[in-house]
Image (spheres, helix red, strand yellow):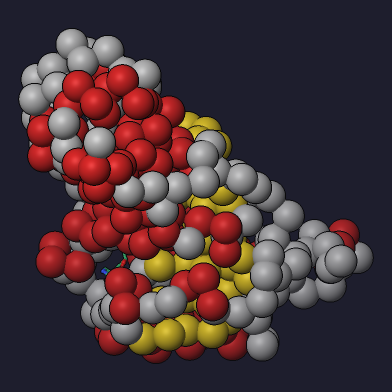
Amino acid sequence: MSDPSAADAEGLAVAGADLPPLREVIARHGLDARKGLGQHFLLDLNLTRRIARAAGDLTEGTVIEVGPGPGGLTRALLEQGARVIAIEKDSRCLAALGDVGAAFPGRLTVVEGDALDQDMGALGVGPRRVVANLPYNVSTPLLVGWLRQARAFDTLVLMFQKEVADRLWARPGGRGYSRLSVLTQWLCEVRPLFDVNPRAFTPPPKVNSAVVRLIPRDRPLMDVPFAAVERVTATLFGQRRKMVRAPLKALGDPVAICAACEIDPALRAERLPVDAFLRVARWLAEGGASIESRS
Ligand code: SAM
């Protein structure tokens, strides 16, 4: 296992130490931030190092970074000894990322393209970790894509808009409890790490941000098809303030479903625990509707 700090202790050159400050990189390559790409760059290397450290020992396997931009977080990941595959949609960033790659020979692969089109569970060798300051406009579809193949990843350390981050660990009846809470908690252990002030970004976003660590469970809370959980959560949270017997009509006979799944029909969806959603999904996946219509 390589120790990235060892070279420093022995007085040898530290990889990446000659890279220019990020502000200079942005000016040199004309990387004026584009709103449509969710570009809010982190220029404080202490903060990017803190995010990289939160992903644990990076010296084995592959770190996948979405949206490296000018490469601040990428540098921190490489300093921690990671091999990084970074997916960036904005071709203007490629030259700057080329310089970062040259400072860490053979350890950075940049893929130009849309992260939503990549099969990230098949990139590089395991263990795979995802570490990213996400473009907020696509953070939810990216997260759902990772959850769909959660076991492909060892750890995900992700910066979200705070309001979205809060949904990931929200409890029944709590603010932000939603479809994303159920999907995430079903498949992962969720750990809120720290909040980040808008002033830490260039340009500052209008919202607060937060870093979250997700550790995919060895076994999900219940073995149920993803599509079934998606359908049940979409149906019930579609009418989150109604008693569940109302939205359940879209899936079958609400009385039969509540009896089979041990749910109080008078409970509102926003108060239903995660395992209750999973029981309805299992009922659906096991042909609940057709069993019910035969009886
Ligand atoms: N990682 C850099 C940092 O922390 O300073 C930049 C983070 S910035 C919030 C989001 C980055 O994601 C930008 O570089 C943007 O160009 C890139 N991006 C936006 N949409 C993307 C997509 N669909 N696929 C890949 N990269 C994307």
Task: Locate the N terminus by quadrant.
Answer: bottom right
Q: Is residue 89 left or right of residue 225?
A: left
Quadrant housing residue 142: bottom left
Residue 108: x %, y % from top left: 58, 81
Instruction: Identify whether 103 is placed above or below 61.
Output: below
Residue at (84% x, 68% y) in the render: 2
Q: Is residue 116 left or right of residue 131?
A: left
Residue 283: x %, y % from top left: 35, 39
Residue at (14% x, 22% y) in the render: 245
Residue at (47% x, 84% y) in the render: 110
Task: Locate the C terminus by quadrant.
Answer: top left
Q: Quadrant of ligand 1?
A: bottom left
> Does residue 150 appear anywhere in the picture?
yes
Instruction: Identify whether 58 is placed above or below 102.
Output: above
Residue 191: x %, y % from top left: 52, 33
Residue 273: x %, y % from top left: 37, 22
> Does residue 229 appear anywhere in the picture?
no
Q: Is residue 92 left or right of residue 9?
A: left
Which residue reaches farthest front?
295
Q: Compare residues 46 and 279 and report the one nearer the observer.
A: 279
Residue at (66% x, 88% y) in the render: 106
Q: Compare residues 6 and 186 and report the one nearer the observer.
A: 186
Which residue reaches farthest right?
10
Q: Is residue 224 left or right of residue 200?
A: right
Q: Compare residues 198 and 166 and report the one nearer the observer.
A: 166
